[in-house]
Amino acid sequence: MDLETAEERRDACAEMQFEYNGDHHYWDYAQWIAEILHNALEHVEGLVGVGNAAAPLRQLVEPVAAIEGIEHATWREVMEDVFSAGTVWPVGQRFQCALQYGMFGVTPAAIATADRAEWIEHLVADVSAFASRSDVRSLETSDNPIIRIANLAASRYALDTVRGEVDTLSMAILGRVSEGRVRNLMSGADAQLERGPNGGVMAVSALAWLMKRKEFLRSIWADEDKDETEETNLPVDLEKIIFVPVARDGSMFGPDLKRGGRYQIGAKGEEQHFDTFYEALESLNAMSTPRWRRPNELGHWGIVSGVSWQRIARP
């Protein structure tokens, strides 16, 4: 997927919102939000009576009626406009933002760059809380788009913060593979993906695997508004860059980490030795969690684990 700029990704999100793999309902959260609202209004009507509820409920759905210019209609007739009934409310707008962030790694352009990290944190918390509601969980669908979008946003956030887990469906969506393949990659003694305690993929392992896939759209919300006409923002020559693992203390794997003329890669007791930097880096890329030896500030060589990946110029 060749979507280099934030604007291209926002446009792509708008185009695919109600179409995915030929199924136009795949990301259609609107119909389910509309159903939740319809059910809630029916509950109110049943509690207070049709006559008492008619005017207040009609006033409540006026934002939906205003979109189509409906004047003389009951609240039930207004709610027949399912798309408007599911998107006009703040919760619908939040799920549109969550889909944009989860799938494409961007935020709305109106969010100031300095505010985006905090904004994303609140967005993920909001949609996750909504998706956990009993009325959402009880919707009659085996493939609930509200839950799927909330999980996708939470998984993207796990990757961006390198904390927590990425659920298997979100991993499949982000990596453009089947969920079955993800599960296979988590299985066996030679598993390429590290399973988390909740059954998902540990974020550091998920990020290491996804960064090697050209289909994966890395998050660009933190730098998306740079002036793309400036020389510093011209398309990067991929032949001149590589990705190296970075430890939690900020140190990264680099060409200077030879010990006794060789690079030491892997967990304690399972270390491998390589003569060249690129052989060692290739081995790190194949690990679910990259581990290597490097000296600390006292010069003692210890094993560290990668928690993220950093783009650097090819040595």
Image (tube, grey):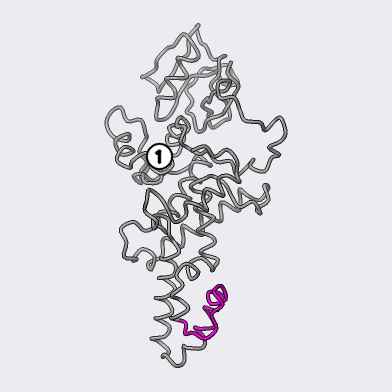
Dot 1 crowding, Cα within 10 Å, few <14, some 14–19, many 20+: some
Q: Quarter of the image for the C terminus: give it.
A: top right
Residue at the disc numbered 1: 176
**Residue at point 67%, 47% (across, down):** 113
Looking at this rendering, what residue extends furthest in the top direction? 261
Q: Which x, y percent locates residue 120?
A: 57, 51
Q: Position of residue 234 (x, y in %)?
A: 66, 31
Q: Amino acid at mark 1?
A: Arg
Residue at 54% of width from left, 74% of height from top?
68
Residue 217 at x, y percent in the picture? 50, 39
Q: Is residue 62 magenta?
A: yes
Start-end of magenta stretch: 56-75
Q: Depth check: give the residue in front, 88 or 53.
A: 88
**16 up-or-down from 40: above or below:** above
Residue at 46%, 72% in the rendered image: 81
Q: Residue 221 colored magenta? A: no
Residue extending furthest bottom?
Answer: 51
Q: Secondary structure at mark 1?
A: loop
**Which of these two is toward me, 134 or 266?**
134
State the predominant SS element of the stretch in magenta: helix
In the depicted structure, whether residue 225 falls above or below residue 111: above
| Residue 181 quadrant | top left
- Residue 9 in the figure: left or right of residue 154: right
